[in-house]
Image: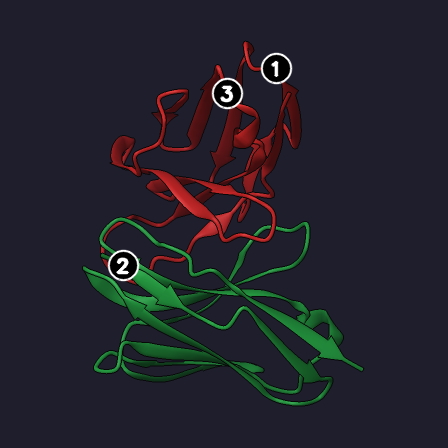
Amino acid sequence: DTEVTQTPKHLVMGMTNKKSLKCEQHMGHRAMYWYKQKAKKPPELMFVYSYEKLSINESVPSRFSPECPNSSLLNLHLHALQPEDSALYLCASSFNSLAGANVLTFGAGSRLTVL
Amino acid sequence: GQSLEQPSEVTAVEGAIVQINCTYQTSGFYGLSWYQQHDGGAPTFLSYNGLDGLEETGRFSSFLSRSDSYGYLLLQELQMKDSASYFCAPVGQDKIIFGKGTRLHILP
């Protein structure tokens, strides 16, 4: 299995809702990432988990809450989002997050619309 | 601080060769990677340079000069399916940051 699977593919939520994005990989990768991408912009790093521990939080607002229940799963919990948070949320994984030829394998993304 | 520069758009003819340049300033630099992203798709890995010099993978090659903080992606025998955005992405300790991307337009 060489895929990263993200669910749901599309999500529409109100500003008062609580929802979660899910990501799963079975490649034995020990690093997992959340990126946010707006239209015609590059992917913007949000969080990095390395060996199931949060290693990087790129000053992301607390209305985004990541969780890594095990080495194969990564969640992004969403609460009280703003319309400007509407974007494509990309999950990625790599063999590890240590220095070296880190190759990111991306999921297809979850397209989020906040009303 | 960190900065990444690559052209915003490049246009080339089918069958031709195109080079996309990337200059970077980043701390904790380990190497330079390149990703391709088609409209509506996810980024996919193309190439990585951990050492100075040229890496070749089929029609795609990538080059790195650490002393110049410079790299490029070379695409040969361009095909219409190569129309996409290309991102240079320096690899650092624990993270990979993407440049703003170069939109490649291919003319028939």
Relative to A88, does residue B11 appear above or below in the rendering?
below
Q: Amino acid at mark 1?
A: Gly
**Residue at image coords 59%, 53%:** A40
**Residue at image coords 55%, 55%:** B43
Colour pattern = by chain
Q: Amino acid at mark 3?
A: Leu
Query: Looking at the image, which is closer to me, B80 or A69?
Result: B80
Residue A10 in the image: state x and y as whole percent: 67, 30
The kind of secondary structure element at disc 3 is loop
On whether disc 2 and disc 3 are found on a single subunit, the reply is no
Question: Which residue is farthest right?
Answer: B108
Residue linked to disc 3: A81
The kind of secondary structure element at disc 1 is loop
**Badge 1: chain ID:** A
Q: Quadrant of the C terminus of chain A?
A: top right
Q: Residues within 10 Å of mark 1 (few under 14, many from 20)?
A: some
- Chain identifier for the red-coloured part of the image: A
Identify the disc placed on residue B2: 2
Residue B3 in the image: state x and y as whole percent: 31, 62
